[in-house]
Amino acid sequence: MNRLNWKKQHTLILIGSFLIPVILMGAYFAYRQMAPFGPSSLLTVDLGQQYVDFFAYFRNLILHHPGSLFYSFSKGLGGEMLGTNAYYLFSPLNLILLFFPGKWLTSGVMALTIIRYGLAGMTMAWLLIKTGLQQGYRIWAFSTAYALNGWMIANQLNMIWLDALIILPLIIWGLLRLIHDRRPGTYIAWLAVMMVDNYYMAWMICLFTILIVAWQLPTLPDWRKRGKACGIYLASSLASAGIAAITLLPTIYALTTSKGTYTETIISSKFEYQPIKMLGKLVPGSFDFSQMPSGQPNIYIGMLLIIGAGLYFFTRRIKWSQRLVAGLITVFFILSFCYEPLDLLWHAGQFPVWYPYRFSFLFAFWCILLAAQVLQPDFQLQWPGALTVLVLSGFIFWVTGRLKLSYLTTSQRLIGLGFVVVALASIMIARRNSPRLYDFLIILVVVCDVSTAAFTSLNKIAYVSQAEFGKYTQQLDTASQQLKHHDHGFYRVAKTFMRTKDDPMQGDFYSADHFGSTLEPPIPAFMGAIGQPAGDGFVSYDNGTQVSDALLGFKYTMTARHHGIMAGDQIMPPSGYRPDWLQLPQVGQTKMITSRQNPAALPIAFGASSAIFQLGKATLDPLSYQSQIFQALAGRPINQPLFNVQNFTAVRFENVQAAHQITGTAFRKQNLLKPTAIKLKFIPPTNDSYYLTLGPEVKDSASISMNRRDFSQYSTYRDTVVINLARHQKGKPVTVTFRLKKTSVWLQNVSVYRLNQRAFNASLKTLQRSPLKVQHTTPTSISGTVKIHQGQSALMTTIPAATGWHVRIDGHKVQPRTVIGTFIALPITTGTHRVAFYYRPPYLILGAIITAVSLTLTCYLIRRQQK
């Protein structure tokens, strides 16, 4: 075949390797009626609860405020974004989402997912063509198996990782050129791209490249060349890291203050489960929802290629030394899938929260690579080998049946065994009589196999409907835009409904909610201390008080109309209850959302007493802590509380023992067959705001209702939370009912408090005397003037403290201080001052310099080498 025909065939192979996965998955999504084909969507688990909101933030970043690349006040109370973007959003493919605004973002997610399937197949085909491991259209069998491998299907929802499968074959192709031809350019370029695209997956690929180098060393003729290859590999890897330093250095620093703080320091030498359970993953469709939080690695690549990978270790075409190294690498992978220290190594020292064995895509790639070397056009399995494979396969399927794995059915095992028989038959047929028909048979067997596995697995997953996402998003965006037209300044918004904790990123407004791996630990610690649902990686401002609303600058509030129900559907899921907002003046309204203004909200910075510098971190209950913070800022004695404990008016016990004290008592069912309830009645003696505190132990053992209506409370929290009971409801009874879900319940920290409105108003008036009058804001800067009065020698802010923040007062640089373990505060003198805050990611400039030097030096050395 001449060169022109070779090029034409290679082009057709690459196009086909892209289109086959696209057509297969596109047809499946259309069959499942995913938007835009129907009423469903691809949103599920983290894709629906987190990533889709980040994609909306990404669109706004590109189209409206690029400064949020570095920092955003939509991330909780505010946080750095370079580390967040490096983990979630630096894929250049995300630019496709610019064409899918608002409720149509789900269609963009589907388009982007399909494209990634296609590109993964295409780059695998490119590797096979360039290495000559396979030839002709039979490459489609290997590329499709790679694109639809078990890891890809199980992690389809984790779109932030999928680029790794696209870039991996290009990195390995560059690595092979480096080892055998001493041409490192391709390897350096694609590894640098991977490091920028997603540093987390890049870490795993970097470890994998070490294994590939070890696998290739036996193919070099002597130790001198092997040493040179290792030297070039090491230098090239460092060059890639240097080129990516502009994102790596700031990201690494950001990780040390967020995700990196959860790194395991105690490692146990133990197996995480019985290794024999991994055999279940050699059956098609071996995945379901229960495998997401914990399970075994997803490594399915089709029976034919699994057999091919196994036969690699018995073929004499390959040097025994290389097969030995390959065997050791395979054993290393298998141990990594069940032995804790190796598992932690691949995951950079942290146990994955859901989605275990995230590096298993590398093993799938590895097995396909081995199979490609064995299943050559002239390969033909003889009867003894086929019989051995069949017996082993039968044994494996018998074992998986005995294990009773939840994600496997008898029909799946029978289908898998059927594909074993078909695969064996297909590679025993002589190719020489009809090579094209033979190649078509190989392609058909593999495509049918991996497609069946993919569709079976995905059929077990539930998805968010398009209406559930689209209607909510449309209402939230409309309400957010109303507020922007009403107020062009800096403000935060609180709300009592929630689709996800990243609603502020979806709706493009500032709040205190966030869910993300790079959330700085002081934020959930503080929010939990003042009575909000919080945990590692998330915060949700659902249980505010008048005090916390004022302190944190929640100038506007949003509540759902009609109880969040439209046309009989709950489209605005409630997450809190705030009767103390009902008297606030209304400033906007949509079909489903009412917006109000809170005149008590303090600005982002204000003059305060220097007593705040001496106030420590939380050690008390949430309302006492709120009171201490507010009183210290106002320069009043912190032992004069703003909240006072109130007694319940009446208590009724049903099927539990009576008790004189509610809080701290463990109640037990007296008759296990009868329903049980504890009813606490409270009649507000004044029109002040009343709040109920509730310990975290209660939520797991009892359901809560208020005046016979199920109480809307975000269900995940680890600290005592604060619930608004009443406001302007003097003399109107409120009955809180706890119904036991288990045999006992501990009513931990269950108490009622009254806000002393007069004392609160007095302290608030003091703090409102010296507001920062903001004149200019961007996502990374705030500037304005402030007039500090007598008795106020601190400028308090609700900007979370971070190394990247810099402050100038009257043009002079001032060192920010951290107060209550969370916020920036500054010493300041009486009088009028001009204040400027600006944020710059730590190590960004150093990273940019290293990138520029590394890129220049690498290009120079490569050009010099080519001369």
Image: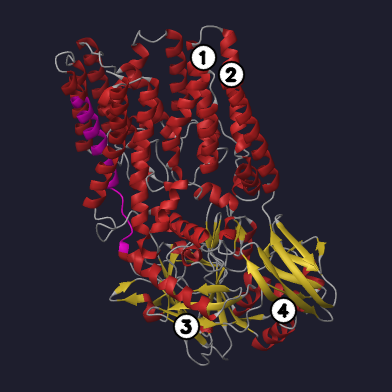
For mark 4, give the secondary structure: loop
Tag on residue 230?
2
Left or right of 505 on screen, residue 96: left
70 w.r.t. 291: above or below: below
Left or right of 73 on screen, residue 322: left
Asked whether disc 2 touches disc 1, contact meaning CB atoms under 8 Å apart, the reply is: yes
Tag on residue 588?
3
The quarter of the picture where residue 408 lies is top left
User: In the rendered structure, which disc, 2 or 1, sits on the residue that comes first in sequence?
Assistant: 1
User: In the rendered structure, which disc, 4 or 3, sits on the residue that comes first in sequence?
Assistant: 3
Magenta region includes residue 447: yes
Rendered residue at 29%/42% (across/down): 22
User: In the rendered structure, which disc, 4 or 1, sits on the residue that comes first in sequence?
Assistant: 1
Asked whether disc 3 touches disc 2, contact meaning CB atoms under 8 Å apart, the reply is: no
User: In the rendered structure, which disc, 1 or 3, sits on the residue that comes first in sequence?
Assistant: 1
For mark 2, give the secondary structure: helix
Q: For marks 1 and 3, give the CA distance.
A: 69 Å
**Where the N terminus falls, by quadrant?**
top left
In this rendered view, identify the residue nearer to me: 636 or 256: 256
Q: For marks 3 and 2, give the CA distance.
A: 66 Å
Q: Position of residue 608 (x, y in %)?
A: 77, 75
Rendered residue at 18%/28% (across/down): 418
At label 2, the amino acid type is Cys
Q: Is residue 52 visible?
A: yes
At label 1, the amino acid type is Leu
Stretch in magenta: 440-466
